[in-house]
Amino acid sequence: MKYVSFLAPQIEEFIRFRTASMCWSESYNAALHAFDSYIVKHYPGATVLTDEIINGWCDRRATETRNSCRSRIYCVIGLVKYLNENHGTVLAEIEPPRRENRKYVPHAYTKEKLDRFFAECDRPRPQNTAAQNLIIPAIFRLLYSSGMRPGEARMLKQADVCLDSGVVAITVSKGYDQRYVVLHDTALALMIQYDKLISKICPNRTYFFPGKNDDYLSRQWLGGVFRKLWSEVSDLRSVTYDLRHNYAIQNINNWISSGLSYHSKLVYLSKSMGHRDIEGTRYYYSLVPMMAEILEQQSGASFDELIPEVRHEESF
């Protein structure tokens, strides 16, 4: 889908810049296309971006929460900043609405439900392609066993996955930093088996989990598949991201049962999950029973002294 307003060349330049800087998300496309359509509809004769156009788009609507407004305008705010810095424009920078704190409690999986979920993953479905019937059990097991963000797994290139060493390079992520994830031996064996089978259907593929036209899988497709499979297991709500949450919580639970070594294991978990700093892992501690008491007992400091409050933002 092409941009059609007078701002199309600058928008496409901005996308190239953000992509090269490794800070682009496909979710921004929808926001920029909506802004592009807004310009065409409300300012059909405009040839220059003005504060009036920006303010008209960025003003919070009566039907919006602060968070939904932030999501809608965030990328446009970045576009304005880019134009001011690189095209000599003097547009007023927009201050987004203050974020509303949200506490999402991920689904607490039981072993029985996980077993049933993966059994559903393994069951071939006639409406799926042969490739999809191979991808589904592999990608959800990878998410479950590695703690990757769903977007990181979807956008993995074949060249990013070394099946000889079991090391996966995460080059497209929520943040700027590349990181490496070492697969568990069981997961590595499954990925080797998957790779052999998918290579017969999609030889010379670009992405480890190929979508249509040798592109990566869409977020909508993966989320839709997860919801459909999960509906066969439980009526309770769960989302794909809960597999990542489960990875963190299970790791922390294992620390407790084996004797907590707080400092080193916290760093390992934080880096493995791609958090920019240790404090970014705080959210998961609040979900583990007795974690605050254990930390205080071992360190003499309170939970909040050890792990300061941070915003929980998991959306990639």
Image (cartoon, grey):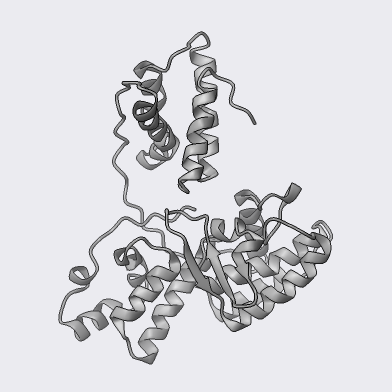
Quarter occupied by residue 93? top left
141 up-or-down from 99: above or below: below
Q: In percent of the image, x 42 and y 18: which residue is there? A: 49
Q: Is residue 107 visible?
A: no
Residue 213 locus on image (x, y percent): 75, 47
The image quadrant where one finds the N terminus is: top right
Residue 220 locus on image (x, y percent): 62, 49
Q: In percent of the image, x 55 and y 36: which residue is there? A: 30
Q: How many marks?
A: 0
Q: Is residue 106 visible?
A: yes
- 7 relative to 97 in the view: left or right: right
225 up-or-down from 185: above or below: above
Single out the residue that lies furthest toward the top. 45
Single out the residue that lies furthest toward the bottom. 258
Residue 61 locus on image (x, y percent): 39, 28
Q: Nearer the viewer, residue 297 or 164?
A: 164
Single out the residue that lies furthest toward the left. 300
- 205 relative to 155 in the view: left or right: right
- 25 relative to 259 in the view: left or right: right
224 up-or-down from 109: above or below: above
Q: Nearer the viewer, residue 38 or 181?
A: 181
Residue 131 locus on image (x, y percent): 78, 61
Q: In percent of the image, x 34 and y 30: which residue is there? A: 85
